[in-house]
Amino acid sequence: MRAVAQRVRCARIRVDGELVGEMGEGLLALVGVARDDTAARAAELAHKLVHLRVFEDAAGKMNASLLDTGGALGVVSQFTLLGDARKGRRPSFTEAAPSEQAEPLVEAVCREARALGVAVVTGRFRAAMDVELLNAGPVTILLDTERKF
């Protein structure tokens, strides 16, 4: 699984103009699922997101996690993270999992994060979403459970 995690002051997710998710400070994670991803990888990604130390501690160092700050986690499914644009100009999405496989794994990330004690907001799977965020820092971290980067 892949994720782009952004430290945010706030974020809003809309579908057809309807607000479906809103959060204050925390992490907004755009999450992509590959064909070979598993429930174990979903749990691994949730743990990484919840424990990622990208928030300032009392000394001003990036040393605190969502658990330390009480921040929320926003999860937005984004199959385009699996796009491969190494050849030509049109990305190939053959590595992206089909929606019937991807949706339960994105839900598993959310479920695991909630079980760890973090408030989670989501978008709507397979919907065209407008995601509005205020990136704090800016801090943006790329995560990959296969450790490709």
Image (tube, rainbow, N blue to C red):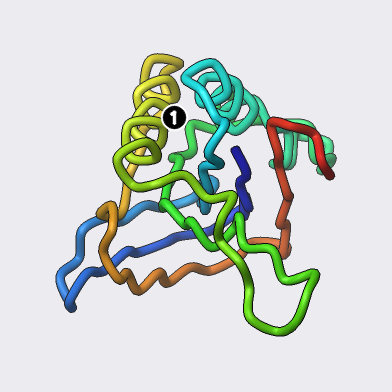
**Left or right, residue 5 beside residue 30:** right
Task: Name the residue located 54 percent from the left edge and 63 percent from the top edge.
Answer: 80
Q: Quadrant of the N terminus?
A: top right
**Left or right, residue 24 beside residue 138:** left
Q: Is residue 93 above or below residue 107?
A: below
The spot of residue 22 in percent (x, y) is: 30, 56
Mark 1 surroundings within 10 Å by alpha-carbon count, few (fewer than 14), some (14 through 19), many (20 or more): many
Q: Nearer the viewer, residue 71 or 17?
A: 17
Tell me where residue 15 sits by quadrant. Answer: bottom left
Q: Is residue 24 above or below residue 47?
A: below
The spot of residue 88 in percent (x, y) is: 75, 81
Secondary structure at badge 1 equals helix
Q: Nearer the viewer, residue 65 or 59?
A: 65
The spot of residue 66 in percent (x, y) is: 56, 32
The spot of residue 24 in percent (x, y) is: 41, 52
Task: Name the residue located 63 percent from the left edge and 53 percent from the top edge.
Answer: 4
Task: Name the residue located 49 percent from the left edge and 50 percent from the top edge.
Answer: 25
Q: In the orientation shown, which residue stands out farthest toward the bottom?
A: 89
Q: Is residue 103 above or below residue 70?
A: below
Q: Is residue 54 above or below residue 10?
A: above
Tell me the kind of residue under disc 1. Val
Task: Name the residue located 57 percent from the left edge and 31 percent from the top edge.
Answer: 36
Q: Quadrant of the C terminus?
A: top right
Q: Which residue is mark 1?
A: 109
Number of numbered discs: 1
**Left or right, residue 145 beside residue 113:** right
